[in-house]
Amino acid sequence: MFADSTPIAPGLYLVATPIGNLGDITLRALDVLRGVDRIACEDTRQTQKLLNHFQIEKKTISCHEHNERERAAELVEALKRGERIALVSDAGTPAVSDPGSLLVREAIAAGVPVIPIPGANAAVSALIASGLPAGEFEFLGFLPEKTGARRTFLEELAAARRSDPRETSRSLIFYEAPHRILETLADMEQIFGGLLNAVVARELTKVHEEFVRGTLAEVRKELARRERIRGEITLLVEAPRRVSPLGGGASEAEKIADRLGRMQFDAGIDEKEALKRLARELGRSKSDLYRELQRERARKR
């Protein structure tokens, strides 16, 4: 092992740890974990397994989402006295959908050196093997757990992307729990349209690592056939494409209202059916179009 015996400088070290395969730990990460005065952990029991594997004896202290604010004040005082402290999450890179951001901000505000120690990250690992555009991507972490909040978030995301003037393709990256993945895929299929390319990366770097690739509809159907879905999941989706203007100088909401009226007149259908058809045609959700229609009507009152 090419360990550096030089004592490390005082500061806060953000140490990425393996997301599954312990062989993904870096030599620099091991040097830092051996060289710090103590290690702040999301879960001390989980980190102890890692330390035991690499025969590292070091004092640990908890720093998780429920105590980070209180713990940050304590750790920053120690850092100001010249201590060397490592921050680790249960797996992957600290502060990325894991505790740590508050501690980092407090350390920076106190003038304490903050040193990143790069390593494993589920989002980037999934992206580079997904086959989706990797030159430009947006990491959005965990979606809201409640159905209504999740759908609203996705609808706003789709609306923002479709009004984005950029023509470049990009990927959206999410983390999701296995017991919610089918609901999330169904929501995305309804709101983004089922033809967008998607990838579910499951159990990355572990024995049962798997990539399920296809359209949103195909990926959902494949997972729905399974008796049970297990493991850590990274979900990647091709970002919804920009919608071309419907013509004229009016706002998109007004154009949608005009088009709904024409569809109702030409096809002899009611507003509900017209909304459903127009949503399919535009690749948008019916509820999203309905809200725009209501906003337009409110403006005319």
Image: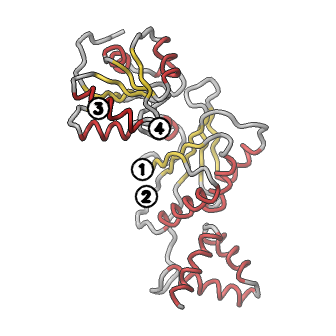
- Residue drawn 74% across and 84% down? 270
Q: Residues within 10 Å of mark 1 (few under 14, many from 20)?
A: few
Q: Three-letter amino acid code at disc 1?
A: Glu
Label 4 – label 3 distance at C-alpha: 17 Å
| Residue corresponding to mark 1 | 136
Disc nearer the start of the sequence (2/3): 3
- Residue drawn 46% across and 31% down? 92
| Residue corresponding to mark 2 | 168
- The x and y percentages for residue 256 are 58, 81
Disc nearer the start of the sequence (1/2): 1
Q: Secondary structure at mark 1?
A: loop
Label 2 – label 4 distance at C-alpha: 36 Å
Q: Quadrant of residue 16?
A: top left
- The x and y percentages for residue 81 are 22, 25
Q: Is residue 124 left or right of residue 293?
A: left
Q: Three-letter amino acid code at disc 4?
A: Glu
Q: Residues within 10 Å of mark 4 (few under 14, many from 20)?
A: few
Disc nearer the start of the sequence (2/4): 4
| Colour scheme of the picture | secondary structure
11 or 199, which lies in front?
11
Q: Secondary structure at mark 4?
A: loop
- Residue drawn 52% across and 20% down? 45
Q: Residues within 10 Å of mark 2 (few under 14, many from 20)?
A: few
Q: Secondary structure at mark 3?
A: helix
| Residue corresponding to mark 3 | 76
Identify whether 50 is placed above or below 241. Answer: above
Identify whether 6 is placed above or below 134. Answer: above
Q: Three-letter amino acid code at disc 3?
A: Val
